[in-house]
Amino acid sequence: MTILSSEMFDYFDGAVLYDTVGVATPDGMRSLVELVSRRLKKRLIAHCHNDYGLAVANTIAAISAGAEVADVSLLGVGDRAGNAATEEVVASITCLYSGMTGIDYRSLSRMCKIASWALDEQRDALKPIVGTSVANSYSELHQDRESKSWSVWLPFSPGLFRAEVKSAQ
């Protein structure tokens, strides 16, 4: 089956791979990027929606498979359930894959706070990476470990993305 002929893409710098309705899986996105990149030899951009909560995973899969650009938005703002959240994609690439994004990850919390204010939308306290509760600890076990080392109970240093540490003592 031919969707578009390769000759058509001689006039383009790249192609955007849309998961418009948010139904792709990370394996599916990886396979799609690999297939298209073998045929087109052009810059690929991944644009993923979050209807099943997979936008970040799909974006990371696309990047790891060869897509060069992640089309993301602060706080994942977008249609329906939103798009891949900039702060989550940047944190994942930086911390889990030791990659470079060109974005100052230390300013993510501040950027999201400004976006939240500008959009007049409240940020979810439990939002990964930038939520106000992301470094909070309420479990006695966590509080005990907290006093010894953050690495026992958090996946990243609380100050890395400017998260505030609070506990229910």
Image (cartoon, grey):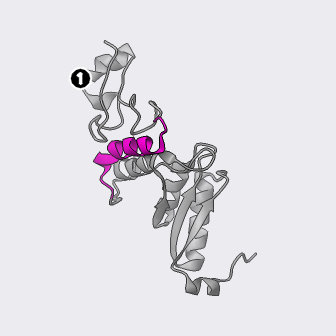
Query: What residue occupies the far left of the structure in this picture?
Result: 148
Q: Which of 48 and 124 is in front in this view?
A: 124
Residue at left offset 39%, top offset 17%: 138
Q: Which of 44 and 145 is in front in this view?
A: 44
- Spot occupied by residue 114 in the image (x, y as percentages of width and height): 37, 44
Residue at left offset 46%, top offset 65%: 69
Above or below, comparing residue 25 to residue 12 in the picture: above
Quarter of the image where the N terminus is located: bottom right
Q: What residue type is labelled 1?
A: Lys
Residue at left offset 24%, top offset 20%: 147
- Spot occupied by residue 102 in the image (x, y as percentages of width and height): 32, 60
Above or below, comparing residue 40 to residue 166 in the picture: below
Query: Is residue 166 shown left or right of residue 45?
Result: left
Query: Is residue 43 shown left or right of residue 81?
Result: left
Query: Could you say whether the residue bearing mark 1 is in a helix, strand or loop?
Result: loop
Above or below, comparing residue 3 to residue 159 in the picture: below
Q: How many numbered dots are placed on residues in this image?
A: 1
The range drawn in magenta is 103-123
- Spot occupied by residue 161 in the image (x, y as percentages of width and height): 31, 41
Q: Is residue 124 magenta?
A: no
Which quadrant of the structure image shows residue 109? Answer: top left
Residue at left offset 32%, top offset 49%: 105
Which residue does the numbered mark 1 point to in the structure image? 148
Which quadrant of the structure image shows residue 32? Answer: bottom right
Q: Nearer the viewer, residue 119 or 167?
A: 119
- Spot occupied by residue 164 in the image (x, y as percentages of width and height): 30, 30
Crowding at label 1, few (<14), some or many (≥20) Cα neighbours within 10 Å?
Answer: few
Q: Which of 147 and 134 is in front in this view?
A: 134
